[in-house]
Structures are given as structure tokens and as C-alpha cells.
Image: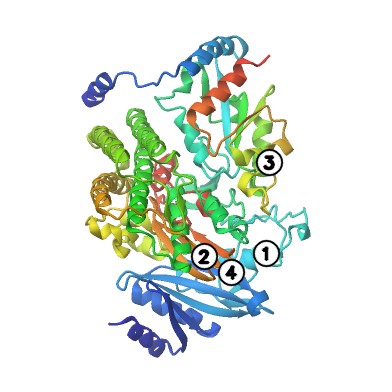
Amino acid sequence: MDFVNILKNIEYIQGVKIAGITQNHPDEVYIDVKEADFAKVCFGLHQSFNSPVMMLFASDQRIINNKFVICCVFLSTEFKKWFIIRINIDKKSPKFQSLAKDIYSASLFEREIKEQFGIEPQGNPDLRRLNLHDEVWPDGNYPLRKDFKLSGVEDTAANEYKFIRIEGDGIFEVPVGPVHAGIIGPGHFRFSAAGEPIINLEIRLGFTHKGIEKLFEGKKIKDAVELSECVSGDSVFSNSMAFCQAVEKVCEIKTPQKALITRAIFLELERMYNHVADMGGIAVDVGFTFPSMYASLIKEAILALNKELSGSRYLKNINAPGGINVDLSGSKKTILIDSLNSISKDFKELKNILFTSASFMDRVDKTGVLKRTTAMDLGVVGLAARACDIPLDLREVFGGVYDKVKFVPVKEKQGDVLARLSVRCSEFEESMRIIKEFLDILEKCENNLAVKFQPREGFGLGFTEGFRGPVLYWVEINKDGLIERCKIVDASFHNWQGLSYAVLGDIIPDFPVCNKSFNLSYSGNDL
Amino acid sequence: MIDIFKNSLKKKIVTRHIPEIEKIGAKLKAEIYKKFGRSFHIREVDTGSCNACESEIISITNPIYDIQRFGIDFVASPRHADALLITGPVSKNMLVALQKTYNAVPSPKFVITLGDCAKDGGLFKDSYYIAGPAEKIFDVSLHIPGCPPEPVDIMKHLLLFLSNLD
């Protein structure tokens, strides 16, 4: 069935009217509806495509168009397209019908829209603030509105965040954070335990909130690339690549094949160093230090390789809209292949040490189980989803250069720490394989790494499959060639909730290993 | 177990010996022994960094750089620390937690900042949600520049600073 038929079906079943369907780019379908029909159309698409809300964001167009606009993004793996439902919102009394009661994965996004724009999602039962903490940010200040001025914000705010309270005989609370015992980002975890098992975990984040989306606004494209590289330090390349991709789409640039393949190679290198570090991290969190040190050697080898290839250990300053400035053919190809061979040997040893240790396997097996249905409801994506039998990998869905190397996505069933460890392990090996194949294809490509780029007015969605999962950038460029609005969604934003369900029933000392097995970004979530 | 043993024998010592660092390190070890009672302990606080700085700080404790051999270590509690190492531009939400952590470090204490955005806010300087930089709040004794600084640079700066302390 064609997607237009599906939309007609939704119109019929839900009794709504779709005002318009436009397709700016081959993989983006914009559906305009009235505010009153918004929730119903979203629910229809959510059911037809079996997709969580991938993005839900507002933008302030009061100056140009006299209104706010809200977009809700779903992904159809069947049509390989993003479906974006768009509504206009009256600027006088900004509100819209909440989706959260029918589609839980919209919940956090709605809270974000409420605190950043002051647009009320009517009917959402939980409108507590996420990033702008009640203790430091007074009510009524909405930073992502265009007319927001910092000078108007008073210094005093003394409200308090209301945690969910679990009460009953013998139940006690353990608050942890925001400053943790390791060298790690800040977040507050509040455990409620009855005896040993955790019966509720509430995660409060936002401590690294820096207003990145606001900082994007008004920036030149070149400066914005630099900013995108500071969104999440361990996903530098996936962020800059998703941003560049969005800009390329808007400006209708055809990026040369050689650049696309080079980008894919770097994306895989980024995945590899993170995956191996996490495998070591999982080991150290159950007190098994040797393999974690071993993994840190492999991570260091990949970072050093990154430095040799691109001049930066974290792959900064190499991406730009239109292409990339590193040529991986010639001598660099030899360096890369030699390093991969030695890394591959070390990795085999690491895998052997981990998977043959009975006591280690005993600790990770059936620990931190995230059920498939829970993950579906929460809209968990990426690696954590693939570990509980949800096969969503943007590399597979959108193919592109990945089709040329016959990319095989990885999936596990159990949803526990071991499953997430195994997904990492298999993805690491698959990355090594496809990098080598990419290098062969690179030789045959036309020798062109970047094309000239001229900013243009418009909007588009850029996406990559980072090591945690999808990294999505919705970018709007204004007529002066500056960024008008940039919405970022890191996989962490979906997945933190998954963690709070995965630990239920486990003991508090198992929390670190569960946490590490998700390894979610604080900075990428808080923005 | 046998695998681990075989592996350690095969790999031998992997620590990279960089002459410059070895030289400062040897001197420092003696100094630390005298001034800080054998070891110098650091408590790291992320006040809104992008996490790349954390990744590099973790790197200097890996077997290749192994900063612990000079008597420097990172500790879990501020009460055990001689210095506070701050990364990130100090977001509004982290201000109170940062101050509490600082107060928990026993005197005499140092504040060290690491990474470009810890110096002056860097790319986040103009944000509406920055309460920092750290030097606005504390007396900062040492800044380690870079975005993120590489492990060798972190070690050099740390070692030089500590060995030149009066």
C-alpha cells in the first residue's frame, strides 16, 4: 500500500481531515493538519508505522508568520521515510492537545516544549520541568522564544522539583548525585527500594543544560558545525555528520560519493572506540578490572588512529556541509588497515577473556532486563532497542553507502546487560568488516571529497546512527543563510527512561553495571 | 584465569615512556612524597562539559599513560581530595552542587580547570544558562587548555604545576 492510502485510511478511521501533503526531500513527508486533529493523526501514524515519536518540537515563527509551529516526527521503516505532522498554533493562547496519554514516547518532548516555549500540552498529566530546574529558573521565562531576553530573567527562584514518592512499610529512598563517584557527567538518581530490590528509579537530568539549541540560532553554518561537535563529546562525528547532512539537504547539495564513504568510515571508527570502552566499563562495574584495562588499550589505539588519520582524536574539524577534508586513500589506507588488523587481534583476546569468565557472565546474564513491550512503549531506540529485539538501525533502513557493503544489523533477544554487551561486541566486529570493504570501494570512487556550498533558505532533517542510536537534527535556515532553528534529539533522550525500567527488581549495587550497559549521554540529553 | 595470565605475559608492560614526562614525573614523585604525604588526589566535577574532557581524563589513567605511577590519582569523594578538577562552563543547574563539592574538599585545596569551555565558557559563553566560568567563583590555580586537551598535555600541565608548587 502506498503511504497516501495509509493517510486516507487514517482520515477515514479517525474522522479527521489532512489539509496538505508536501514532500520537500525524497525521504521527508510533511503532513499539515488542524490543531484539533493533531493528536488523532499522530496516533494513526504511530499505529500504522509502529514508530515511537522520534522528535516533537516547536518553533517560534511569530515574527514572520504570526504563529508557533509544532512538528511531530515518525519514522516509517517500510517506506524509508520520515513523516512529519505539522500544526500551527495561535500565538495568543499557545496550547495544543497532548499526545502523551496515547503515545507515551511524546511525554518528555511535551515537557520540553512547555518549558522552552510556554506552549501548553493540554491533558499531559506530568508537566514538571526537565532542563530548566525549578530551583534556579523562575517561572514564565521561555528561552527558545525569539523575544526572550536574558536580562529579563530575575535571579531568584525558589521552587522545588517534586519527585515521585513511593510510600509504604519498609520503603526507603536513596538519592544519588548529581556529583557521582567516578569521572562522569552529572545526573540525579533517586532509588526507592523495599529491602534489596529497587521498586522505582526516578532520573532527574538537565544538570549539563547549556542552551545549545538557542546558541545555534543566528549562527553562520560554519560556526554551527563547530557547535554541533560540542553537543556530545563521545559522538562528535555523528553529530557533525547529522548536522551537515541536514544542511546539505536544505541547500540541495549532492555530496560526492567519496565523501559519503569517508564519513561512513569515521562514523564506524567512532562507534568502535565507544563500544569497546563500554565493554570495558561493564567489566569494571562488576569489579573485573583486567579486561577493562585491556579495552582501554584498544580504545586508545583507535583514538590514536583517529588522530593520525584526521588530526583529531575525537574527529573534530573534519566535517563540513558539502564534504569532508580527509582523504583516506593512499598511505592513510595502509595505516588504517594495519591498525585494524592489530586492533582485531586485541579485540579477540578481550572477547575471549570476557565471555569465558563464568563469574562475569553470571553477573551480566539476566541483569537489568528491559522488556520488549516496555521498550516499545517508551520509544527506546538504537543499541538498547536492538538488544531487546527491536530491529531499528538507520544504517539498515536508509541504506545509502551501507547497501554497497551488505551491512548486517545486529539484534539480540534478552534485553539484559549481556544482550547489550553482545550487541556491542557484534557491532564492533561488523564495523571492522565494513570499514575494510568501504576502503576498497573508496579506491574506485571519483576523486572528489567536497563540493562548494551556498546556504539557502529552507528546512530539512539530518540523521545518523551514532553508537547509541539515532542522532537527529532538524535544521531551518533563514533567508540570510543563518540558522533559524535547530532541534537536536540524541538517542539518550529516548533511552534514559528505558534505564529506569531496566533496573526494577534488581539490587542497587547492580545499578552501575546497568547504567554502563546503556551508557547514555548527559550532555546530549540535556543540550 | 589462564588466559589473563598468558595475556599479561605476552603483552608485557604497555606504558608509553615519553622522555619529557618521565623527567618531570620523576621529580614530581619525590616532591609529592614530601609535600602531600606520598600521593596527590584529585576530585573531578563535570559542570556541563560535553564529556570529551572526561574521556581524556579517564585516558590518563589507562595503562598507556598511567598517571598513577607518579602518585596522582582520581578519587570518588571530595573529602579525600587535595584538588578539585572542574570541566565545563558551570551551568546554572550545577552551581550549587559544585559549591557543595568545593566545600567538602578539606583545606588547603586547589582548583584546577580543564578544557576551553571551563576557562571562559568557550562556545557556550553567550548562553542564557551559564553561571560560570569557574574563575568567577573560585580562585583557579591552574588551567589546562584544549578542546579536549590530549592526555599528554594534561599530564604535562599537571606535573609541571605540581612540581613547581612552593
Element marked by disc 2: strand
Residue labelled with disc 4: A478
Chain ID, mark 4: A
User: At label 2, which amino acid type do we have?
Assistant: Val
Q: Residues within 10 Å of mark 3 (few under 14, many from 20)?
A: many
> Which sits earlier in the primary sequence, circle 1 or circle 4?
1
User: At label 3, which amino acid type do we have?
Assistant: Pro
Front in this rendered view, residue A268 or B130: A268
Chain ID, mark 2: A
Left or right for A267, reference A88: left
* Disc number placed over residue A142 in the picture, else none: 1
Q: Is residue A370 visible?
A: no
Quadrant of res A527: bottom right
Residue labelled with disc 3: B133
Percent x, y of residue B61: 45, 27
Which residue is found at the position 69% from the left and 32% from the top? B103
Mark 3, mark 2: which one is toward the viewer? 2
